[in-house]
Image (tube, grey):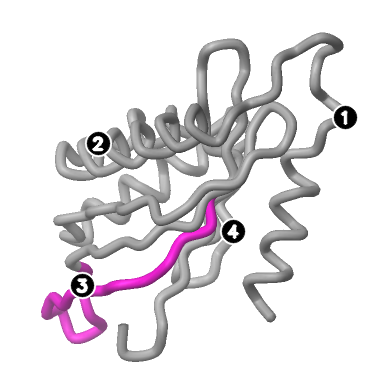
């Protein structure tokens, strides 16, 4: 059920209304390349612990629904979020793009991730989960519009 709601949300966020007249539709192959590139850059920036580079992967008003629950909106808030995340010692992030679906000037992807994250007791554990990511192309530049990870209980 949650996946269905997220797909509807992704479609609404991408929308075709903002597509310029005569703009070429995004192909699935192009979106897969963009999603894979953004995933690699996300992992690389995570390893470098670079909050500004992380935020730059998102649209200026991009949204992260963090696994802990808060909604992080906009690049300034994303920089603050990732600064805190890196200070916690989280590391070893890896994204795998499983599938993408196009719509207008973007689309959405279903991804898997793993990361070493801090536990409440200060120890570290491996987390594995899924991500729904909404992508948008602006000219030749791709950004993430929305990222919503989910971590299953005990994940």
Dot 3 or dot 1, earlier in sequence: 1
Of badges 4 and 2, the one in the foreground is: 2
Residue range highlighted in magenta: 117-133
Pointers 4 and 3 in contact (C-beta within 8 Å): no
Q: Left of 100 or right of it: where is 8?
A: right
Looking at the rendered structure, the secondary structure element under dot 3 is strand
Q: Left of 57 or right of it: where is 41?
A: left
Q: Residue at x 16, y 78 (%)?
A: 125
Identify residue for label 4: 71
**C-alpha separation, residue under disc 1 versus residue under disc 4:** 25 Å
Identify residue for label 1: 17
- The image quadrant of residue 51 is top left
Dot 4 or dot 3, earlier in sequence: 4
Residue 28, percent across and down? Answer: 55, 36
Q: Residue at x 74, y 57 (%)?
A: 9
Q: Residue at x 44, y 30 (%)?
A: 34
- The image quadrant of residue 19 is top right
Residue 134, percent across and down? Answer: 59, 45
Residue 93, percent across and down? Answer: 22, 54
């Amino acid at each position: 059920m949650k996946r269905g709601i997220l797909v509807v949300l992704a479609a609404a966020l991408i929308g075709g209304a903002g597509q310029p007249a005569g703009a070429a539709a995004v192909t699935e192959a192009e979106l897969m390349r963009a999603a894979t590139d953004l995933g690699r850059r996300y992992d690389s920036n995570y390893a470098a612990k670079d909050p500004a580079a992380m935020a730059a992967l998102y649209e200026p008003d991009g949204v992260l629904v963090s696994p802990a629950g808060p909604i992080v909106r906009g690049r300034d808030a994303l920089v603050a979020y990732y600064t805190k995340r890196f200070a916690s010692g989280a590391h070893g992030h890896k994204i795998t793009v499983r599938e993408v679906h196009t719509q207008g000037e973007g689309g959405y992807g279903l991804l898997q991730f793993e990361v070493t994250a801090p536990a409440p007791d200060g120890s570290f554990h491996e987390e594995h989960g899924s991500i729904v990511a909404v992508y948008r192309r602006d000219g030749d530049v791709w950004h993430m519009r929305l990222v919503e990870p989910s971590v299953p209980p005990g994940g």
